[in-house]
Amino acid sequence: MRELLTTFVRPKYLVKSAESGAEALALVESADVMLLDRRLPGMTGTEVLEAIRRDGNDIPIAMVSAVDPTFDILEMEFDDYLTKPVGQQELLTAVRGLVQRIEHDPVLRKYFALRTKIQLLEAEKPRHQLARHAAYDALRERFESVKPEARAIVNESVDPDDVTDILTRIEG
């Protein structure tokens, strides 16, 4: 699967791949974005993600996994999450989004990461489960608290060519 995903991305981006969590950690400093599988030999993608964030690295990361997202994603500091099987267009769109996030204000990155988690959970969990989960409520509150600042940043500092796309995402 790693090789297939690599072939999807390689025509547009320089790609380095790792067979294990330890190899992935060794590549962090030379990467602009990362795609991490949650199931890696040696250490899990979640452990790799935690190690990267613990080291203070804010590289944009997408988890790419056959593991359907559950409430455990609330504690994970990723920018995007793709559930396998992943098609070429979906993967390229995700990578393009990660690359664009490098240039975004940290508040916008936080906004998009929180929104991704909310969308994942709402797609996977029935409303009654979400309603009973305090951490989900806290996630929604964090998202709503970031939204006004994200809107203000978009209005003040984003290139006019990008405003429509970003505003659509913030309003949506």
Image (cartoon, rainbow, N blue to C red):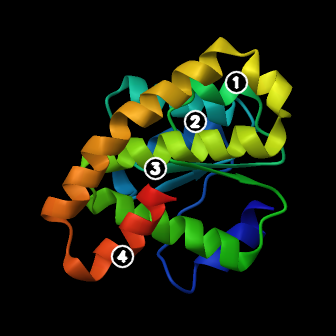
> Do tag 2 and tag 4 residues touch (Cβ < 8 Å)?
no
Q: Residue at x 61, y 26 (%)?
A: 74
Q: Which residue is mark 1?
A: 72
In this rendering, the answer to whether 42 lies above or below 164 is: above
Upstream in the sequence, badge 2 or badge 3? 2
Label 3, residues with CA under 10 Å away: few <14, some 14-19, many ≥20: many
Q: Residue 1 at what x, y percent from top left?
A: 81, 62
Residue 43 placement: quadrant? top right
Residue placed furthest toward the bottom: 11
Quick check: 25 above or below 36? above
Q: x%, y% of residue 161?
A: 27, 83
Alpha carbon distance from label 4 to label 1:
33 Å
Q: Earlier in the sequence, mark 2 or mark 4?
A: 2
x then y, percent, for residue 8: 68, 78
User: Type of residue at label 1?
Assistant: Asp
Residue under the point 84% across and 25% down: 128
- Residue 164: which numbered mark, if any? 4
As measured in the structure, the alpha-carbon distance from the residue carrying label 2 to the one carrying label 4 is: 40 Å
Whether residue 169 is visible, yes or no, is yes
Mark-to-mark CA distance, 2 and 3: 28 Å
Q: Using the image as rendered, state which of residue 38 and residue 112 is in the foreground.
A: 112
Based on the displayed image, in which of its 4 quarters is residue 103 positioned?
bottom left
Residue denoted by label 3? 112
Left or right for 130, reference 81: right
Q: Which mark, by number, is residue 22?
A: 2
Disc 2 vs disc 3: which is toward the camera? Answer: 3
Nearer to us: label 4 or label 1 = 4
Could you tell whether 108 is left or right of 94 in the image? left
**Amino acid identity at mark 4:** Thr
* SS type, badge 4: helix
Q: What residue occupies the far left of the structure in this picture? A: 156
Q: In the image, residue 87 lies at what x, y percent?
A: 77, 73
